[in-house]
């Protein structure tokens, strides 16, 4: 895969990010691609420590999430696990990304696609969500 030229526009869902904007504008809109998986805070600051992934109240049996950069390169992998406490009503934290790559380095400002599967109640659901990092 060839890297994108520095001034290439990128389409993210219903938004086009022009290639000549400053770094803080290169973040994703807060938009879930899956009916179940959500992320927060989103967008997230690199100095915040991380972003959590939430699932509605039903129990989670396992799964995994892979994080991709805007070029489609795998950046990191997160194991899905159930957190014992419910957060904000019926949502539970099922994973956290510390905004690092597989080598422990903080990722660059940009838009990341998180895709994977969550097993809940014996049923496997393919999920995805866009996360913006600034």
Image (cartoon, rainbow, N blue to C red):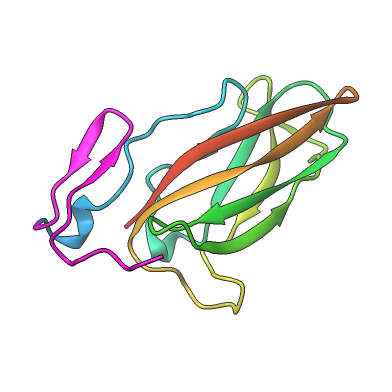
Q: Eyeballing the image, is 18 above or below 74? A: above
- Which quadrant holds the N terminus? bottom left
| Residue 102 shown in magenta | no
Question: In this image, 23 relative to 116: left or right?
Answer: left
Q: Position of residue 64 (x, y in %)?
A: 74, 47
Residue visible at 49% across and 29% down? Answer: 33
Residue visible at 52% across and 57% down? Answer: 50
| Residue 15 shown in magenta | yes
Image quarter of residue 22 = bottom left
Extreme residue toward the front, this view: 1
The magenta span reads 1-20
Question: In this image, 29 relative to 53: left or right?
Answer: left
Circle count:
0
Q: Position of residue 43 (x, y in %)?
A: 37, 45
Image quarter of residue 59 = top right
Most common secondary structure along the magenta stretch:
loop
- Which quadrant holds the C terminus? bottom left
Q: Eyeballing the image, is 97 above or below 113? A: below
């Amino acid at each position: 895969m060839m890297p994108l030229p520095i001034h290439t526009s990128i389409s993210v869902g219903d938004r086009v990010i022009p290639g000549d904007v400053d770094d803080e504008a290169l973040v994703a809109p807060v938009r879930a691609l899956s009916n179940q998986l959500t992320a927060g805070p989103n967008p997230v600051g690199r100095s915040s420590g991380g972003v959590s992934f939430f699932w509605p109240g039903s129990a989670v049996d396992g799964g995994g999430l892979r994080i991709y950069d805007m070029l489609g390169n795998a950046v990191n992998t997160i194991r899905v696990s159930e957190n014992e406490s419910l957060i904000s009503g019926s949502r539970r934290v099922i994973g956290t990304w510390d905004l690092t790559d597989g080598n422990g380095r903080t990722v660059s400002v940009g838009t990341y696609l998180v895709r994977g599967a969550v097993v809940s109640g014996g049923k496997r659901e393919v999920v995805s969500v866009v996360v913006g990092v600034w």
